[in-house]
Image (tube, rainbow, N blue to C red):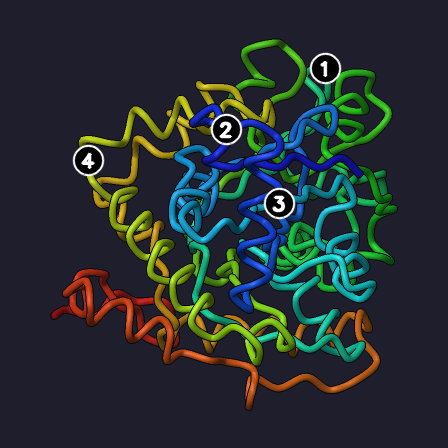
């Protein structure tokens, strides 16, 4: 695991003694010296940066550091090569206060093992899905790779996405109908290049440009395939510092609003290349088709979010990925989000979706 800490005081050029003084002041005021925020991923080669979305923009723009600079509170960002499962382990060991974008499967698995956190808002929704094979493959459809080796990072949201893609193509027992191995993104892409795997779900454009892979199936923003991500806070931190939680949610809503502005589209494409996970061409090709950025960059907990997470809960049981029942009852804490939307006059800004994923007309 690698970590990277950002602090607006450092940007401003304060000395180390000054930083120590700020942290001491925070403790004296009954505030935490540090707020620890995790992301389930670490960029290419373990590079400690987020990948995309408005929560990533909050890092790149220094929004959270700016919010707490005057309080002397440091922000510590933590990134996990092991993705969602590793983030769960870190939180279980008392190393995190927030997560800025947990995928559905690890979120649910963590809850089933007794992790205590509160869901605050969605970190985004939608997205396209592509099934890719090595560039030299003769496969024309997913049926052509039946019985062969596929790769996904197990325990992550990508595992359920792969299962849904396979189910969409008539394969309802994926672990029996394919040999599915677990690899992190870098290893999976290397295996595509060498032909050691027959296929995977991944963003294709950069890989195609390098002659590594080709897509044989794709689907766009299908609410049955994709599932929203989640921002959560640990219950202990929430109980002790509710005013700080509100300030973080306020900032995230502000950044989400900035991220939906058409004038900022190209800036985001550039920012999202910093982790190395996706090339500029991946970001542009994946997002240029989206005419209204609010349909993906959306913090709401609406009927679609609830239905999608409940569907994911059912799938984790179906595929025997959890041993205990999980319910959204008592898990959602929406006062912070509602307050932020009201204060920023954004109550009706983002389009809502019904349980099926259909956008509701205002």
Residue 165 visible (yes or no): no
Residue 330 visible (yes or no): yes
> Who's the residue at 38% across and 74% down the image?
336
Residue depth check, mark 3 versus mark 2: number of the one nearer the observer? 2
Under tag 1, what secondary structure? Answer: loop
Residue 316 position within the rendered picture, expressed as x and y whole percent measured from the top left: 72, 72
- Check disc 3 and report the residue beneath it: 76
Under tag 3, what secondary structure? Answer: strand
Front one among 338 and 186: 338
Precedes in sequence: disc 3 or disc 2: 2
The quarter in which the C terminus is drawn is bottom left
| Disc 3 from disc 2: Cα separation | 17 Å
> Who's the residue at 30% across and 30% down the image?
288
Front one among 255 and 303: 255
Front one among 80 and 141: 80
Residue 27 position within the rendered picture, expressed as x and y whole percent measured from the top left: 60, 61
- Check disc 1 and report the residue beneath it: 136
> Who's the residue at 39% across and 34% down the image?
61
The answer to whether the residue labelled 3 contacts the one labelled 2, judged by CB atoms less than 8 Å apart, is no
Q: How crowded is mark 2: few (under 14 residues within 10 Å), some or many (20 or more)?
A: few
Q: How crowded is mark 4: few (under 14 residues within 10 Å), some or many (20 or more)?
A: few
- Check disc 4 and report the residue beneath it: 262
Precedes in sequence: disc 4 or disc 2: 2
Residue depth check, mark 4 versus mark 2: number of the one nearer the observer? 2
Residue depth check, mark 3 versus mark 4: number of the one nearer the observer? 3
Precedes in sequence: disc 3 or disc 4: 3
> Is residue 18 left or right of 57 when viewed as pictured?
right
Under tag 2, what secondary structure? Answer: loop
Total labels: the figure holds 4
| Disc 3 from disc 1: Cα separation | 44 Å
| Disc 4 from disc 2: Cα separation | 35 Å
């Amino acid at each position: 695991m690698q970590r990277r800490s950002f602090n607006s005081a450092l940007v401003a050029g304060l000395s180390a003694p000054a930083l120590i003084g700020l942290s001491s002041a925070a403790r004296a005021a009954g505030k935490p010296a540090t707020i620890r925020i995790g992301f389930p991923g670490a960029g290419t080669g373990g590079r400690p940066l987020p990948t995309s979305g408005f929560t990533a923009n909050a890092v790149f723009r220094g929004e959270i550091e700016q919010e707490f600079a005057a309080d002397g509170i440091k922000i510590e960002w933590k990134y996990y090569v092991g993705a969602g499962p590793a983030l769960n382990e870190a939180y279980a060991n008392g190393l995190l206060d927030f997560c800025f974008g947990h995928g559905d499967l690890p979120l649910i698995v963590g809850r089933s093992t007794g992790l205590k956190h509160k869901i605050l808002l969605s970190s985004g929704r939608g997205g396209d899905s592509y099934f890719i094979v090595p560039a030299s493959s003769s496969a024309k459809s997913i049926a052509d790779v039946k019985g062969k080796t596929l790769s996904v990072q197990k325990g992550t949201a990508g595992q359920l996405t792969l299962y849904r893609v396979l189910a969409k193509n008539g394969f309802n027992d994926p672990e029996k109908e394919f040999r599915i191995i677990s690899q992190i993104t870098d290893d999976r892409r290397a295996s595509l290049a060498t032909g050691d795997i027959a296929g995977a779900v991944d963003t294709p454009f950069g890989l195609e440009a390098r002659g590594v892979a080709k897509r044989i199936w794709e689907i766009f923003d299908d609410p049955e395939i994709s599932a929203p991500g989640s921002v959560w806070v640990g219950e202990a931190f929430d109980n002790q510092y509710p005013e700080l939680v509100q300030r973080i949610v306020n900032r995230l809503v502000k950044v989400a609003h900035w991220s939906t502005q058409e004038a900022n589209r190209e800036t985001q494409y550039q920012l999202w290349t910093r982790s190395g996970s996706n090339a500029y061409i991946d970001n542009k090709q994946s997002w240029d088709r989206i005419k209204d950025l609010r349909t993906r960059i959306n913090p709401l907990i609406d009927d679609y979010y609830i239905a999608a997470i409940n569907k994911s809960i059912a799938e984790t049981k179906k595929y025997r990925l959890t041993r205990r029942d999980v319910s959204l009852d008592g898990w959602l804490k929406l006062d912070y989000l509602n307050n932020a939307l009201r204060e920023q006059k954004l109550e009706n800004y983002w389009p809502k979706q019904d349980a099926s994923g259909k956008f509701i007309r205002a």
